Amino acid sequence: MLRSLVKPLARAGQDEPPSSPPRHTLSRLFSYLRPYRLRMLVTLGIYVVCVTLTQLYPFIDRKLIDEHIAVGNPDGFLPLLFLAVVMHAVNWGGVYVRLHLIQRISWNILVDLRQQLFRHVAGLSFKFHENEPVGKTMTRFIGDANTLNDFLTNQVANVVNDVMSGLIVIVLMFAINPTLTLIALCMLPVLTAIGLYMRPRLYEGWERVRENMTRFNIFLAENIAGMRVIQAFVRENVNLGQFQAANQRVVTEWMKVIGLQSWFSPLVEITRSTALVIVLFIAANRLGVGGEVLTVGTLVAFTAYINNLWAPISTLTNMYVVLQATLASADKVFQLLDTQPTVTDAPNAVALPPIKGEIVFDHVYFGYDESRNALEDVSLRIAPGQLVALVGQTGSGKTTLASLVCRFYDVTGGRITVDGYDVRAVTQQSLRSQIGVVLQEPFIFSDTIANNIRYGRPDATIEEVIAAAKQANCHDFIMRLSDGYETVAHERGSQFSVGQRQLLSIARAILADPRVIVLDEATSAVDTETERLIQDAFEKLMAAEDSPHGRRTAIVIAHRLSTIRKADQIVVLKHGRIVEVGNHQTLVNKPGGYYAALVRAQATGH
Ligand SMILES: Nc1ncnc2c1ncn2[C@@H]1O[C@H](COP(=O)(O)OP(=O)(O)OP(=O)(O)O)[C@@H](O)[C@H]1O
Ligand SMILES: [Mg+2]
C-alpha cells in the first residue's frame, strides 16, 4: 500500500517540467523587473528625453542653415546656437545618468536571479545532481541568466529608444516636408521585408552555434575534471581529437551564420543608400517637391534623418531574434526553477528532536530507476550506540542503504525510522544535522583547512577545530603545512592524499558532533600507518568521548576486517538483499557464508 503510494511521488519530480506558452514565459520574466519598476520608469523617461533631444538637432541645424547662414541673417542666431549647446549638455548628462541607472538595475536583477537559482539548485535532490551535467547547470547561471537580464534592461530600453527615435524622426520629417518624407520612406517596407526574411534564419543559425557551444562547455568541463584519468590512460591524443571536433563544430556553425549575416548588412545599406540617392537626386535637379524646391537646410536635415531612421528600424527587426533567444533561455531557466526536488519536507513535517540514535529499516525497497531495485526487502534494527558493518560485493547496495538513512533518496517501499520517527515525517534539516557522513571520496572545498573542518558548524572556534583535528589524528600533518590551519586547500583538496582527506572529514564529523555516523570507508589502499590513524580517529569518533550520551550509532561500509570484526552487527548484502546478519563469532563459522569466505580470503591474502 505504502509502496504504491510513495512510488509515484518519489518519481514525480525527475522529469523536466514542460515549457509554458511564450506569453506566460514573458510575463514571468517581466516579474523580475517588478521590484525595480520605478527606477526603470525613470530610466526610460531619461531615454525618451535623450532621444527627443538627439532627433531635434537636425531640425535646429536646418533652421540655422536656412534661416541664418544661407541668408546671412544674424538675428536670433546666437540664442538658437545656445539652445543647441544646452540641448547637447542635457543629453550628455542624460546619457551618463541612464547608463548608471540601467547598469545598476541590470546587476540587481542578475544577482536576484542567480541567488534564486542557487537557492533552488541547492535544494534539489541527489537525483538531479547525479543526472545533470555540471556544465549545463552552470550555463543557466551564466549564459542564460545574462541573456534574460540583458533583455529586461538593455533590450527593453533599446526598444523604447528605437520606437521613440523612429516616431520622432518620422514626425519631424513630415513637419519639414511630407511629400519628400513619403518618397524617402518608400524603401522602408523593403528594409522591413529583408529583416523579416533574414532574421529567423539568422536566429536558427545562432541557436545551432549556442547548442554546439553548450556541448563544447560540457565536454571541456568534464575533460578538465577528468584530466588525471586522461593522462593515466594516455588518452591525450584521442581526447584532443574529440576536442578538436567539438571546437571545429562551433566554428563551422559560426561561419555559416556569418555567411548569412554578411548578406544582411550590405542589403540594409543598399536600401538606405537608395533612399539617400533619391533625396539627393531631387535636390541636385532642384525638383519641386510638395510645392517647394529643396533648401540646403532641408537636405542636411533629411540626410541626417534617413540615417537616424535606418539604425532603429534595422535593430527593431532584430527584436524577433532577441525575443526568440530570450524565450529559449527563459524556458531553460524556468524549467530548472520548476524542477521539483524528489525529496521534500512533508507539509506537516516536524523537527526531529535530539535523537538517541536508533535506526530501523522496515521492509525497505528502493530503486534508482523503475527498471531495477537496488535494495529489496531490507529489514534491520540498529540500537543506539551500535556499530554496524555493511559488507558485500561491489554494487551490492551498501552505499545506497547508507544514503537512505540521511534521506538523500526516498524509499519506494517500506520505511526507515530514526528513534521511531519515519524519516519522511521530519524535516530534512533536522534529520541530516544529526547524522555525520564521511563519504567514500571525501570532498574538500577550496577554503582554509580550518573552515573545511568547521563545515558543519561554521561558528566553531579555532580551539574546537584544533581539538577535533587532534582527535581525528590530522593535527600533525596540518601543522606541517605552510600556513597550518589557514592553508587554503586546492579545489577538491587535491594536494592531500585520500587518507588525509578521510582524516579531515572525520575531524569535520567529530566537530559537528552528530548522534549517528555513516562512514563509507575509502576503498583505495592506504599505507598501514595511515590506516592505523584512520582506525584510531574513527574509534574516537564513535566513542564520542566528549559526549554525555555515550557511543554514537555508526553504520560503516567497511573493507578491512579489522573494522568489521569489532562490529556489533555485520550485515552482508547481496544484490540489494540482506543475506547474512550477525556478529563476527556467529558468521565466521557459518558454512557457505559470504562473511566466512571473506574472512578466509583476507586471512590467506586472496
Ligand atoms: N546514482 C545512481 N543511479 C543509478 N544507479 C545507481 C546509482 N548509484 C548506484 N546505483 C546502482 O545501485 C546498485 C548499488 O550501488 P551501491 O553504490 O549502493 O553499491 P555499493 O555496495 O556501495 O558498491 P561499492 O562497494 O562498489 O561502493 C548498483 O547496481 C549500482 O549500479
Ligand atoms: Mg559504495
Image: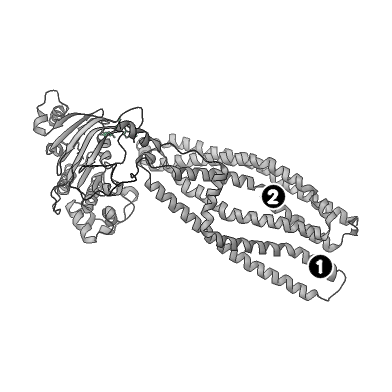
Q: Which mark is residue 314?
A: 2
Looking at the image, residue 160 lies above or below residue 95: above
Q: Residue placed at 67% from the left, 50% from the top?
A: 316
Query: Which of 569 and 588 lies nearest the eye of the viewer?
Result: 569
| Three-letter residue code for mark 2 | Ser
Q: Which mark is residue 360?
A: none
Q: Residues within 10 Å of mark 1 (few under 14, many from 20)?
A: some
SS type, badge 2: helix
Q: x%, y% of residue 56?
A: 74, 64
Front in this rendered view, residue 223 or 93: 93
Q: Residues within 10 Å of mark 2 (few under 14, many from 20)?
A: some
| Residue 450: quadrant of the picture | bottom left
Would you place residue 499 above or below residue 546 in this image?
Answer: above
- Picture quadrant where residue 203 is located: top right
Q: Is residue 557 toward the left or the right of residue 206 in the image?
A: left
The residue at the point 24 percent across, 51 percent down is 508
Name the quadrant containing residue 599: top left
Q: Residue at x 66, y 69 (%)?
A: 90
> Which comes sooner in the sequence, label 2 or label 1?
1
- In this picture the colour scheme is one colour
Q: Position of residue 466 (x, y in %)?
A: 21, 58
Q: Secondary structure at mark 1?
A: helix
**Ligand 1 rendered quadrant:** top left
* Separation of residues labelled 2 and 1 (CA atoms): 29 Å
Is residue 102 among the parts visible in the rendering?
no
Q: Is any part of residue 140 visible from this angle?
A: yes
Along the line of sight, the residue nearer the viewer: 414 or 376: 414
Please tell me the numbered disc located at residue 63.
1
Q: Nearer the viewer, residue 454 or 361?
A: 361
Which amino acid lies under the numbered mark 1 shown in the image of this protein? Lys
Say which quadrant the C terminus sits in.
top left
